[in-house]
Amino acid sequence: MVKKSSFLIILFFLLNCVILYAQAEDQVPADKPKFDFTMNLTIGLSSYEDITQNQVAFQKLGIFPGFAYGRWGLGFDLSLEFDADFHLRDLDHDGRPDGWTTLHDYLTKIYYLQYGVKGDPLYGRIGTFNGYTLGHGLVMNNFSNTLFYPQIIQLGLNLDADGRLIGFPYVGFESLVDDVLDWDIIAARLYARPFLDAQNPIFKGFELGATFVTDGDTLELPTEVPEDNPASERVAEFGIDVEVPLLEKEGMSLVAYADWAKIVERGSGGFVGGAFTYQWLNLFGQIRFLGEEFVPAYFDSFYERDRGAPPAVKYASLDAYTEFYMGYMIGTELSLFKVLKFSFQWEDGLHDVEGPRVLTGIQTAEGALPKFIASLVYEKKDIDGIDDFFSEGDSLLRLTAGYKISPVTKILFVYERTYSPYTRDPADRAFVDTQFSF
């Protein structure tokens, strides 16, 4: 059952956005907002791994209406998937079609409700989100609420506000909830820019932040309608971070930062790092100092898989870290001849219990190839050796390739390696769609 408090929270979110929007409008004159409507239709095939770990194919009719008014946006995912007998999809074999039987199911047809964009003085979103990082990622890095999507749909909440909105640009906050219909993972970061009026650019760009993240239902298993596990214990982590710009010239910048964090009733650790950017090149790295019972990025891309029973796997894994250890992270992002964008990141702890982790991606630059679009993102953790680099365990992969037939029509192929919400084992998903956009 959907909690009454969830509706109140959503209402509170909307009212706050309206109030802050009105405040912003009083300060900055703007043109009258325009109303826009878009419709994306897809016809194709979907393939998933069901609760018995068999691959099952479905005929797919995707309906994605979107509405926009000024800085507000609302989108729905009304996709229908039919098996060979023309029955609606039932991956968990409970005798009911997935996603169309309860009030919760209908609420999760909301793909997003959004105000503004990330980085605006005011930004809010209810729906799915990917790759969420707080600060420089020591506490939460690359966290998503879509690991089991579309079998399990979560209406996450992002709400950010910067003091610029009310003429006080020295403070701000960013926040996250994994699912407003089942509040378990809650995160927030407060930040301050106390020397913003200073003439010295180093002091002017100085930023101090404080992060807090908690998971109140560590034993929860993913289900279509979430249910709290009364045996769960709360996990919490807090941290501080500081950032200083050392160099800022046209087309070139150098930023240094340091973070420290502690898992409550467990260990603590930190890192120092920097990022150098010059036109098409970005280089970054960290040196890490990590204590007993502590790992960097406890809330990471795999967290939704690792957190659950039995018993609280992620939390229990901290027992293996019995002594202080050091680590590092290095990476780069490149724009190659304005045709391809490439990124690579490698991180490892020295003499720790887990192997290295890699995150890499490549994609075509926007507009570089008028008819073709393609991208590949791959993440792998706990790499035991060269042979293990591309193994399916502890890895995430998304491959997208598309061909634009006309301005409104394209053929799209998507392949994903992710995890089954039913078994938590690696699972493959594939989609072949003909998309129409109006």
Image (cartoon, helix red, strand yellow):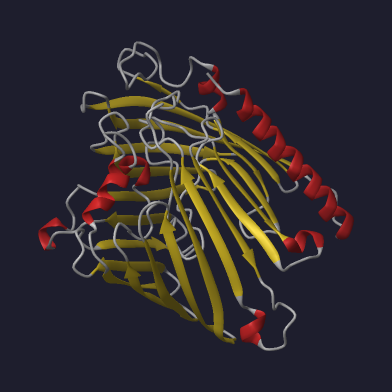
Horizontal and vertical percent position of residue 233: 40, 37
Left or right for 21, reference 82: right
**x and y percentages locating residue 240 in the rendered image:** 51, 65
Work out whether residue 336 can be spotted: no
Picture quarter containing residue 152? top left
Kindly identify the residue that appears in the image at 44 percent across and 78 percent down.
Answer: 274
Figure quadrant of residue 217: top left
Name the residue nearer the viewer: 399 or 249.
Answer: 249
Nearer the observer, 413 or 380: 380
Q: Which residue occupies the extreme front position in the image?
A: 265
Residue depicted at x 79% and y 49%: 21
The residue lying at 38 percent from left, 57 percent from top is 297
User: Where is residue 145 shown, x and y percent of the image?
Assistant: 45, 42
Quarter-of-image position of residue 47: top left
Q: Is residue 329 above or below residue 177?
A: below
Locate residue 213, reporting x and y percent: 49, 50
Numbered marks: total: 0
- On the question of residue 45 being in view, the answer is yes
Q: Nearer the viewer, residue 77 or 17?
A: 17
Q: Is residue 146 above or below residue 274?
A: above
- Dividing the image into 4 quarters, which one contains the C terminus? top right
Left or right: 87 in relation to 322: right
Residue at the image position 37 percent from the left and 13 percent from the top: 87
